[in-house]
Amino acid sequence: MRGAVIHAPGDVRFETVDDPHVLHPTDAVIRTAVTCVCGSDLWPYRGAEPIGDPHPMGHEYVGFVEEVGSAVTSLRPGQFVVGSFATSDNTCVNCRNGFQSNCLHREFMSTCQAEYVRIPNAQGTLVATAEVPDEGLWSGLLAVSDVMGTGWWAADAAEVRPGSTAVVVGDGAVGLCGVIAAKEMGAERIIAMSRHESRQKLAREFGATDIVTERGEEGVERIRELTGGIGADSVLECVGTAQAMSQALHAARPGGNVGFVGVPHEVAIDGQELFFSHVGLRGGPAPVRRYLPDLIDRVLTARIDPGKVFDLTLPLEQVAEGYKAMDERRAVKTLLKP
Ligand SMILES: [Zn+2]
Ligand SMILES: [Zn+2]
């Protein structure tokens, strides 16, 4: 089969790779329905993370079950399934505590920009829909497999409550999905921090009530002005840079909470400052599996449409252009069709 392989910064190729097979009784192999490029794929693409030997890419997927291992009893070939970037058995203590992305048997997916994908821990990881959904819903379900699940986790970790004020730092796909999540959780005021007109428009469509274009301490100042001088109840940090984290921590009110879901790169947190701020901080890789049944339902019933974050659709074989468009910020997120 063919799939995306990264060779060096800026060098992603679509090439022949080994066909995936069931290696363990707990595996499944799926045929990719649609997949995509993630903002976090840009870290190695931009040389901000070491690449090492050429390796496959991609961790967001929906697909059709092709083959299952002997221990997989809940899935059968032909079913349409949604998974997560972190596989989980969904039975160990961490899974039962709702932190499936810290499953004791976790494996991170990394081969999904391809025609077929092996899914470890298939029974715990994959959620099948009752029937094959209308193709128009695939993009929304694909978003659920990572960015929507991650945006939901950001809002959950920031403890968004009905009637509260939420700030979303970051206008990438996760930030935009964070706006959806904050709205669904009942936030009354949702302040999106964004400098890009098309992203501001989508943020408003998703439920943002205010847009702040300033960044850094100027942005924090604006948030303070909008929140009676004290800061927001909840802040969703969806970037992962030092500036975004500092902006998030400073935008939260005393007793407020920051949910951070951008993979941190050179982020350092000052203990003294955190101590005296009274801000709660929680983040990490989203336990997407916990949210899958609920989020799949919200997409299938058209309550939410996170698929709108995909503003570029390409054939899978043009995956390199998909990376380039996102790197150059010509696209928020690229959907890839095998
Ligand atoms: Zn991702
Ligand atoms: Zn587990």
Image (tube, helix red, strand yellow):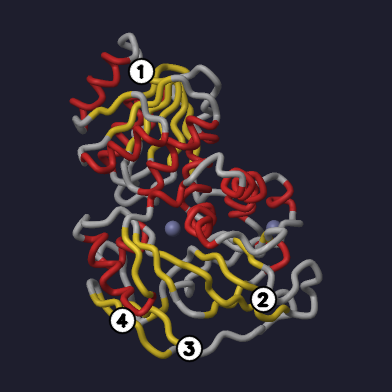
Q: Residue at x 31, y 42 (%)?
A: 171
**Residue at left offset 45%, top offset 52%:** 307
Residue at mark 4:
13
Q: Earlier in the sequence, mark 4 or mark 1?
A: 4
Looking at the image, is mark 4 or mark 1 nearer the viewer? 4
Q: Which residue is mark 2?
A: 28
Q: Are marks 4 and 1 in contact (CB under 8 Å)?
A: no
Q: Where is residue 217 drawn, in percent x and y?
A: 21, 27
**Amino acid type, mark 2:** Ala
- Marks 1 and 2 sit apart, C-alpha to C-alpha, by 47 Å
* Residue that appears at 48% across and 66% down: 59
The amino acid at mark 1 is: Gly
Residue flagged by tag 4: what amino acid is it? Answer: Arg
Side of 32 where 48 appears, left or right: left
| Mark number, residue 231 | 1
Quickly name the residue at label 3.
1
Image position of 229 with respect to 170: above or below = above
